[in-house]
Amino acid sequence: MYKYMSFNTYTSTFTINEDGTSVYTINMSDVTTKCMQAVSVDPKGWIDNAIDNRTRISGEEIYKQELERHIEAGTMPTNPTKETLILAYQIPVEEDVDTSAP
């Protein structure tokens, strides 16, 4: 459970399905629900808009990176689409760096 303030609580789950789709579920307390309703008449629409805008921005960044990568390497796939280039993108894996060494 995420708890930023003592009165603001919710739980959420995020599951990636075998086909690459996902399910995100959020359960908000009565207080969190009331706060979201104060932010927007339509909290679901507000959340949908946040997801849509953030993924659109990320998708455009990934698409441009993939285009540049393929152009520079001369490896452009046949008939690429924005979707196929985004889906082929390899998300970098962050490695833990030990900063405790002197």
Image (spheres, helix red, strand yellow):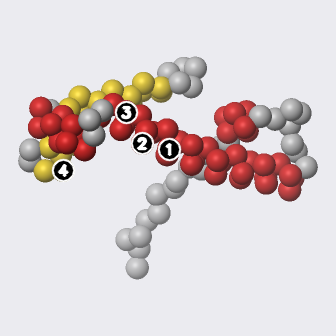
- Amino acid type indicated by mark 4: Tyr
- Of label 2 and label 3, which has the lower sequence position? 3
| Quadrant in the rendering for residue 30 | top left
Q: Quadrant of the N terminus?
A: top left
Q: Are marks 1 and 2 in contact (CB under 8 Å)?
A: yes
Q: Which numbered circle lies on residue 50? A: 2
- Cα distance in 3D space between marks 2 and 4: 19 Å
Q: Which numbered circle lies on residue 53? A: 1
Res 12 seen here: no
Which residue lies at the image location 30% right of the left edge and 32% below the top edge? 42
On the image, the x and y values in percent for residue 99 come to: 41, 70
Of 55 and 34, nearer the camera is: 34
Q: Say which residue label 3 marks.
A: 45
Of 37 and 14, nearer the camera is: 37
Q: Is residue 45 above or below residue 2?
A: above
Query: Regarding mark 1 in the picture, which secondary structure is present there?
Result: helix
On the image, the x and y values in percent for residue 73 come to: 87, 52
Q: Say which residue label 4 marks.
A: 4
- Of label 3 and label 1, which has the lower sequence position? 3
| Quadrant in the rendering for residue 32 | top left
